[in-house]
Amino acid sequence: MMPATITPEQARAALDHKGVSIAEFSRKHGLNKNLVSDLLNGRIKGRRGEAHRAAVLLGIKDGVIAQ
């Protein structure tokens, strides 16, 4: 069974709830903060590469992160 994904708005709320900024989340996971912001604002979908990885880590996309 696939884990439930959340909306970008829910992902942003989850970061706020934890007191974690987009910049801090990005640094922790080695991501570009502008890319994370674009995902959370719905400007990009997170289909490939770093965007895919960020979307999966945020919980807005069900997927596998290749090592």
Image (cartoon, helix red, strand yellow):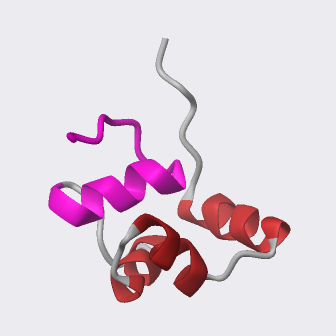
The reply to whether the magenta stretch includes residue 64 is yes
**Which residue is nearer to you in this view: 30 or 2?**
30
Name the residue at 34% across, 81% down: 32
Decide: is 61 above or below 20: above
Q: Residue 67 placed where, x, y %? A: 21, 41
Q: Residue 65 placed where, x, y %? A: 29, 41
Q: Residue 33 placed where, x, y %? A: 42, 85
Name the residue at 31% across, 54% down: 53
Name the residue at 70% across, 68% down: 15
Displayed quadrant of residue 14 = bottom right
**Which residue is nearer to you in this view: 29 or 22?**
29
**Which residue is nearer to you in this view: 29 or 59?**
29
Displayed quadrant of residue 42 = bottom left
Q: Would you say 40 lies left or right of 54 here?
A: right
Decide: is 52 above or below 12: above
Name the residue at 38% across, 61% down: 54
The reply to whether the magenta stretch includes residue 4 is no
Q: Would you say 66 lies left or right of 33 here?
A: left
Q: Residue 36 placed where, x, y %? A: 42, 76
- Residue 5 showing in the rendered view: yes
Q: Residue furthest top?
A: 1
- Residue 46 showing in the rendered view: no
Exactly how many numbered labels are in the figure? Answer: 0
Q: Which residues are magenta?
A: 48-67
